[in-house]
Amino acid sequence: MKLKPKVLAMILAGGRVDELNVLTAYRPKSAVPFGGFARVIDFALSNLMHSGLERVAILSQYRSFSLINHIGIGAAWDMTGRHRGVSILPPSQGSGQSSWYRGSADAVYQNLDFVQYHDPETILVLSGDHVYQMDYREILQYHRDKDADLTIACLEVPMAEASRFGVADIDDEDGERGGRILQYQEKPANPSFNWASLTVYCFRPSVLYEVLAANAREDESFEFGRDILPRIMASQKKVYGFKFRGYWGYTRTVAEYWQTNMDLLGEAPKIPLEEWGIRTNLEHRAVRDCQPLKAGPAASIENSLVYNGCVVEGRVENSILFPGVHVKSGAEVKNSVLFFDNVVGHGASLNTVVSDVNVTFGARVRVGEPGAPQAEKVTVIGWNNQVPDGMVIGSGCTLHPNLRPEQMDREVKNGEVV
Amino acid sequence: MIQGDNTLVLLLAGGVGSRLNILVQTRAKPAVPFAGLYRVIDFSLSNVMNSGLSQVGVLTQYKPLSLMSHLGTGEAWDFTGRTREVKILPPRTGSQDSDWYKGTADAVRQNIDFIRARPSRETVILSGDHIYRMDLDDMLRFHRRKKAHVTIAMMVVPRSEIHQFGTGITNSEGRIVEWEEKPKVPRTDLASMGIYVFDTEYLLRLLEEDREEVDFGMHLIPKAIERDNVFAYLFHGYWRDVGTVQAYWQANMDLLKPEPEISPQAWGIRPNPYADRRPVDRCPARFAEGCVVKESMVSAGCFIEGEVINSVLSPGVRVGKNARVRDSIILHDCVLEEGAVVDLAILDKGVRVGQGAVVGKGEDKATPNKAFPTHLYTGITMIGKGAEVPARAMIGRNCVVTPLRRGEDFPSLVVATGDTI
């Protein structure tokens, strides 16, 4: 019998990152478009829906309009009803101390009244920034089986890359399933173990309340990975690692973001959107008002994802087109990701480009270099730019949003930032 | 803008549309899918929405289930709110007029209580069967300006087609002075589009006069023209009755032209994506290495490995390796297995075409279907909902495979032109 939900999910969706600054100039990282119709946070939300977890809070602070708009009332993920709901928790003023969220842990700490009101048996903390499919019921079951204070989902990464992550040393207590975490280090310079934390945490509420309070009282920094996990490790709690083995896509840098997009393509895509059952909110950006893709007489579309509302008269290869993209005749788009309402003019050629919403490429514009795509050579273009006819932009360039015409009146060389 | 709550809209969606053959075996004509994502009725509903009208009754009778689920709460067309609503009005028993709807006017008469319960100055009556865009608000303003009792939307059609319509002869002011329903010998090229604006009080009086008068075009309109002010509101532009297989196919093909006269998105036509079986889950269309897609419309959720030319694909269609689609309309979730060929055909939802099978084979497009010679005579072959065409089957032109046929239902792998399974 299902009475009140036992698990409260909290999605950390507040952040922006400097490496993705062009795409996060006007939206948090979790609201960055992904996959031709969705947003990055849709992966966490869809996973929650498919796991039957529908009491959700989203902690949001940076430029949250786009995110609030996207979440709506949560109906897209079936999160409306007597025991279902999405609450967006922005920073707020109170009678005591009131401040912006000083970190992910502080964001949860400032909303403890909300958490305690729901009085969950387990608190599931997630990041809204990752592209993956996970049935959270498995890690929750492991967490309960072990009667753990904290269970962390971890992915084995090459030792050479381990220094970029929070990494755990997991013992062999339950073999393939997981084990006790013996040590945890946040971005160690010389890692000696390589189970990377995926920012999927199951907490025993009393333990979380206690450590958040201590963190707020005594520390200078308020992050889960850097502060909360080490504190819990130091206090001899029962901390387990749940071994995850599926696909995990990062979106922290332009190169990572582009690579994760490319993982949607190919004969057997690493990200099978359909199989994963990704849901998004069709209400905003009038996605539901779009007619089907229209391909012209000279169109060619290969190894690509194209959503409703696009018009393709030219060539599209290894690319992802969001609704409203128009590729005019003679134009060529390769290895690129074009967000909503991009227009690619006659005879223009784009190679390895990530272009934000509402960018118009004039006729005969050239962006990027021909040849095999490389993640390091992605040119990223901020929103609302008009690239004039015939302009040449190199590879690995960065064009900020809303540039004025006089800033676009020249060739942009490889690697330049405008 | 004339205030939306002063005008009531009645949408006649009861039509059988039997000439659409297998497309209307499981659904009413207004619920027939069109242009990939839409249903025919979306055009009328969106015209109503875009004209700022928001009190709507939909009169249904024939196979209303898919229509009802498509309408839902009416939220897709903004018909929910304090003064906005859409109500389904099926025939019912127990009231004074308890019977099946015997005609357009009879259907409206049986819902007089609905009309009275929503006091309105005018009542707009239209059909849910047509593909067009029209500003009904402009028609209402015309109606008031002319101080008309009734205004009928009319358009010029070729003389060769006039016999299918109600026709009117107008005087210099635009007042209709003579009316002929489906004339054998045309005297005018002005045809009724089946869109009427009535002064509500006038409509109620007319309906109550004689219960034997069951049809607008046959009975009430001629009577009104004789006695009162009936005006013609001239419409120019794209308007199609997609009531025949040929017209339905042609209107879909019209979408694919480089400068199409018809563009659902530009017209502000809204589908209801939530009423579908898998509402929001459709992912972007996926195109494999080596596929060919030209002069076509492809909806979200399709996966194309083969070749698609001059065709309209609804969501979730899979075109396997070396499979080819040409000049066809493929509805939701059809699967064309490896090497299958579909040429000049309409596939209803969930059809599977087995490996190497051909739908639409041969050069003879002129031999009509033997069972339905008036439905299929231009070469189009139709496959019914959920049917499975066995691997390597060869199906000719003007054929019909009725819904849910499976391998054992095919007497032989060769289905000759004009045959029906």
Image (cartoon, coloured by chain):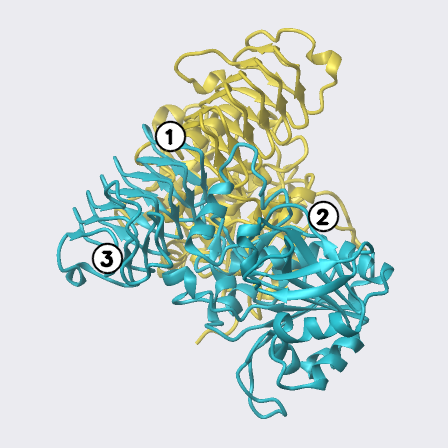
Chain colours: A yellow, B cyan
Quadrant including the C terminus of chain A: top right
Q: Is residue A258 left or right of residue A19?
A: left
Please determine if labels 2 and 1 lie on a single subunit: yes
How crowded is the residue under tag 3: few (<14 C-alpha within 10 Å), some, or many (20+)?
A: some
Chain of the residue that carries numbered disc 2 in the rendered image: A
Hey, which quadrant is residue B23 in on the image? bottom left
Choose between B320 and B369: the one closer to the eye: B369
User: What amino acid is labelled 2 in the image?
Assistant: Pro
Total number of numbered discs in the rendering:
3
Please determine if labels 3 and 1 lie on a single subunit: no
Quadrant including the N terminus of chain A: bottom left
Q: Which mark is residue B419?
A: 3
Q: Which mark is residue A303?
A: 1
- Residue at image x 62%, y 41%? A222
Chain of the residue that carries numbered disc 1 in the rendered image: A
Q: CA distance from mark 2 to mark 3?
A: 70 Å
Q: Secondary structure at mark 1?
A: loop
Please determine if labels 2 and 3 lie on a single subunit: no
User: What amino acid is labelled 1 in the image?
Assistant: Asn
Q: Which mark is residue A91?
A: 2
Whether residue A42 is visible here, answered yes or no, is: yes
Q: Position of residue A398 (x, y in %)?
A: 60, 18
How crowded is the residue under tag 1: few (<14 C-alpha within 10 Å), some, or many (20+)?
A: many
Whether residue A113 is visible here, answered yes or no, is: no
Chain of the residue that carries numbered disc 3 in the rendered image: B
User: What amino acid is labelled 3 in the image?
Assistant: Asp
Q: Position of residue A319 (x, y in %)?
A: 45, 28
Q: Earlier in the sequence, mark 2 or mark 1?
A: 2
From the viewer's perspective, is the residue at label 2 or at label 3 nearer?
3
Hey, which quadrant is residue A300 in on the image? top left
